[in-house]
Every structure is written in C-alpha cells, then in structure tokens.
Image: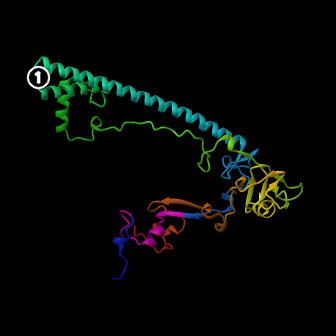
Amino acid sequence: MGGQRHSKNAGVMGSESLTYAERKALGFGTVKERLGKDSLGNYDDCCLTLMEAKDPVITPDGYLYSKEAILENLLAQKKAIKRNLQAYEAAQQQEQQKELEKQAIEKEAALIAFDRRNHLGVSEGVAAKLEAAIVKEAEALRNPKEAGGAKSVIAIKDNEDRAKELKAFWMPSLTPEAEAKVEKPDTDTRCPASGNKLRMKDLISVRWTSVPEGECGKHMDPITKETFANASKLVVLATTGDVFLKETYEKCIKSEGSYGGKRVRDKDVIELKTGGTGFAARDGERVQTKKYFAMGPGNGLRDLRGQHQGPRSLGGLVFMN
C-alpha cells in the first residue's frame, strides 16, 4: 500500500484530506513553547505577589511568601470556609425539614386510604391510587414547578395523560432540572502554590544573609559567603530560618548535626522552590508553556502566507481559494 491513509489520520471534521505534517503547519493541537528566564520568577520572589518577598516566610513544602500576603490569603480562605459551612448547614436543615414533611404527608395519606377501605368499602387498588394521588398532590403544592403547577388530584392525572402525548421534549416546561445540592466544603486552609494543607503556625520565618554593600547580588551563604543566584539550590533550616546553599548544608552542617547552638535534623531542612533559570535541564517542565489551538489560527511555527494565496508555507500547504 502506498501513499498516506488520510481516513486513518483524520484529525477533525473538515481536515480528513490533511496529513499530520499539514495539520501541524496549520497549528492544530497542543503547542509547547519554551520560556526564557524573564518569564520565570527569582529565588526570593513571593509566590503570590510575584515580587521580592517582604518579611519572608516559607511553607513546609518550600514555597516562599511575603508574610502579609500569605496571612491575608489564609484569612480570606477561612472566611470563605465559614460562608460555605453556613450554606451547607442551611441546606442540610432544609433537606431534613423536607424529609419530615414528606413522612408526615405519607402517614396522613395512608390514614385516609385506610379510612376509605374500612368505612366506604373502597377496593385495595382504588385506595392505593388515592394514597399515591394525595402524596403527589401534596408534593405539587410544596414544589409547584416540579409538579407542573397541578392544583388537584384530577389535574395531576390530566397532566400525566397529556405529557404522554406531548413530543416536544425541548419545551422549558418539560425540561427536567437537576436538584442543586450543596456539597460539604473543605474546612482546611491550603497553600496557594502547592494545594496542600497549610496553617498559620506552619509558616517559618526566613532570615537572609545580606551581601556586603558595594558587592553584586542581594543575599549570600552565611558560611561560604557565596552570592545566591536563580541557579542556586537553596535550603532553609526550620530551626533558625537561615538560608544556605544545599552543598554547604551537606558538607558543613549535616555532619555536625547542629547550627547556631540548635540541633538540626533532616526533617528540619526545607528545600526552597526557586524561580528558575530558563534551562530545561534544570527546571524541567517549568520552562514550557502549553496552549491548545483549533484548526486554522496558527501558532507561529509555520509561515501562514500559504493560507492566503501567497507562496508556499514551510509545511508545503497551499489553499486554493
């Protein structure tokens, strides 16, 4: 078999005659683009304000925030949780009230049907229909929209007969509606960056060691005096809040097991999530952005002049308009 099997390679309706390379030339699908270092944050930037962190604090997962920004965020989350809990509790009370009313109606309908059977000689079948009609009528009075606005047992039966004959299921009055249910809200405040649980008491204050005046850079390692850069791998000691190069910690502090007169264990060491350098070998997926393009708009990966009766595009695609 020779040639392309377009029917097997078709992407979407209307592109059955296009090959994979041609669809790529049009910009169809998910496109990845590499970001430069200017698109990534610095190692000392707040994850909320995207600016240099003021009075910096770090989470147990290694995300840096300005203290004021993260406290405002956690407070806003608490207020939202309180509102959602109140709405959930009100919905639960409403559901319980509906259930109690439904049980009372069913009990009253059963008593009426029992009275008709024993005092008026009504058959079991008729009594059962009467009981069901009473329950449905009561539901119609409680929820007129759901029951089609029925006002009596006779009206309910008439509406049922007419509904069987109607074929216009798209009419608003015949369109079923899903019952809106309020789900129980999450009561935990969470880190905006990682989504993990985060409480105010989990935040750890960060202490930078400033570079001497007149030298390049902002912060440095307190032991080796090496200036930090975005490419530096940094760790924060939870016991003191000091920031070190990861290499310095492993060579100088880990073996001693203490710093500044305080014991340092492995669980006390938090690796700082730095902004990035723009190099995929170091930052991985963080230096890529993804965007989905539908058929036609293009993504800049191919010259689009061929779509407008110009010369051939780089993918060799020409539209004969």
Residue 159 part of the magenta segment: no
Splitting the image into 4 quarters, where does residue 38 fall? bottom right
Residues drawn in magenta: 12-31
Quadrant of the rendering where the C terminus is positioned: bottom left
Residue 73 in picture, x, y percent from top left? 64, 40
Which of the two residues, 207 or 55, is positioned nearer the viewer here? 207
Query: From the viewer's perspective, is residue 18 above or below residue 154?
Result: below
Which of the two residues, 303 or 91, is positioned nearer the viewer here? 91
Q: Which element type, helix, strand or loop, lies under badge 1?
A: loop
The residue to which callout 1 is attached is 122
Residue at 73% over, 63% down: 231
Residue at 38% over, 25% down: 97
Splitting the image into 4 quarters, where does residue 201 fall? top right
Question: Does any portion of residue 317 appear in the rendered image?
Answer: no
Residue 19 part of the magenta segment: yes
Splitting the image into 4 quarters, where does residue 123 fall? top left
Residue 53 in picture, x, y percent from top left? 74, 47
Query: From the viewer's perspective, is residue 161 above or below residue 252?
Result: above
Count of picture labels: 1
Query: From the viewer's perspective, is residue 2 above or below residue 166?
Result: below
Q: In the visual, does 148 lie left or right of 124?
A: right
Amino acid type of the residue tagged 1 in the rendering? Val
